[in-house]
Amino acid sequence: MSLKDKVIVVTGGAEGLGHATAIQCADIGAKVIVADVNLDGAENTAEIITSNGGRACAVAVNLAQEDQVACLIEQTEKLFGQLDILINCAGILLNAGQRVDQFSSKSWAEVIEVNLSGSFFCVKHAVPLMAKNGGGVLVLLASGAGIFGGSSSVAYAASKGGVRGIALCVESQLQPLNIRIHVALPANMATHMKIKAAGDSADQHGESRQEAEAKIRAECASPDASAAFLTELVSDEGAIIAANQLVISLGDWDRLKTGER
């Protein structure tokens, strides 16, 4: 498997799944734009890639701001002349464990702006450059929340269900442009966001924050396996394996690779 000469934008690349995915893509030949609202973290990821002999550049972006997303894509073209793949790992989860009638409208708006509007802005501005260069791959991150089950945060669940809605709508629009789109469901991971959400939810229910966070660290995997899944999914081999799979989970991927149904 190779991503040699492919240009990839990975959002949320400062930490967690985005960080691991950017590094794994670079390790097999991709040129990576590491995008994150946390520029210091994105630069750290890019430095790890370049110190390993890869090519990467960090770009600051707030996905809630359309002009910043448009600028991200413009910078990608200026730096590398093309865009082959975009993996949108950026996301936030607020007010975990809070009952719906107590949920802050400000927090609702913030989560929807980053997770849902941000996904829309990424697709909207990536598509013209991908089409200009003959096609590409878009991966939007959802989760079981909002698709198969609930979540600790009503805004997070709604945003991730909406991400699936975007992909369902635009899939047929993108096929004539040779652009494939997937909604990926990674495994439960011991990321900063997941650990904090568990602690916040415990606080809401009068439970031990320390125990809740320790449980996540013990039971959830590192992001590495899900990063490997995303890296394979966007490759040419992934196009063959995934076929017409729009929503695809890490478990689905493992079964498809072994020929199980």
Image (cartoon, rainbow, N blue to C red):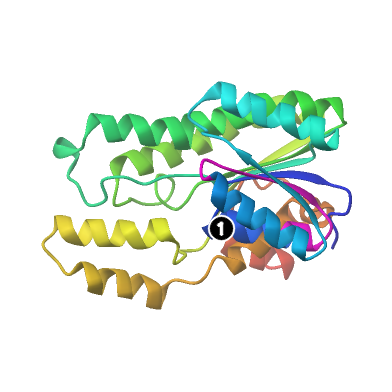
Q: Amino acid at mark 1?
A: Leu
Residue shown at 84% from the left, 57% from the top: 29
Residue 178 in view of the camera: no
Q: Residue 234: image x %, image y %? A: 74, 51
Residue shown at 30% from the left, 69% from the top: 213
Against 211, residue 56 (above or below) is: above
Q: Determine which quarter of the picture holds residue 94.
A: top left
Mark 1: which secondary structure? Answer: helix
Residue bounds of the magenta highlight: 25-38
Q: Is residue 167 magenta?
A: no
Q: Residue 140: image x %, image y %? A: 59, 42
Q: Is residue 115 shown left or right of residue 40? A: left
Query: Looking at the rendering, in which quadrant would you find the N terminus?
Result: bottom right
- Point out the residue furthest to the bottom here: 218
Residue 181 in view of the camera: yes
Label 1 sits on residue: 17
Dot 1, crowdedness within 10 Å: few (<14), some or many (≥20)?
A: many
Query: Looking at the rendering, in which quadrant would you find the C terminus?
Result: bottom right
Residue shown at 68% from the left, 68% from the top: 260
Q: Is residue 33 magenta?
A: yes
Q: Residue 227: image x %, image y %? A: 63, 61
The residue nearer to you, when weighing 226 against 241, is: 226
Q: Is residue 3 shown left or right of residue 123? A: right
How many numbered callouts?
1
The residue nearer to you, when weighing 71 against 242, is: 71
Residue shown at 23% from the left, 57% from the top: 201
Q: Residue 122: image x %, image y %? A: 61, 31
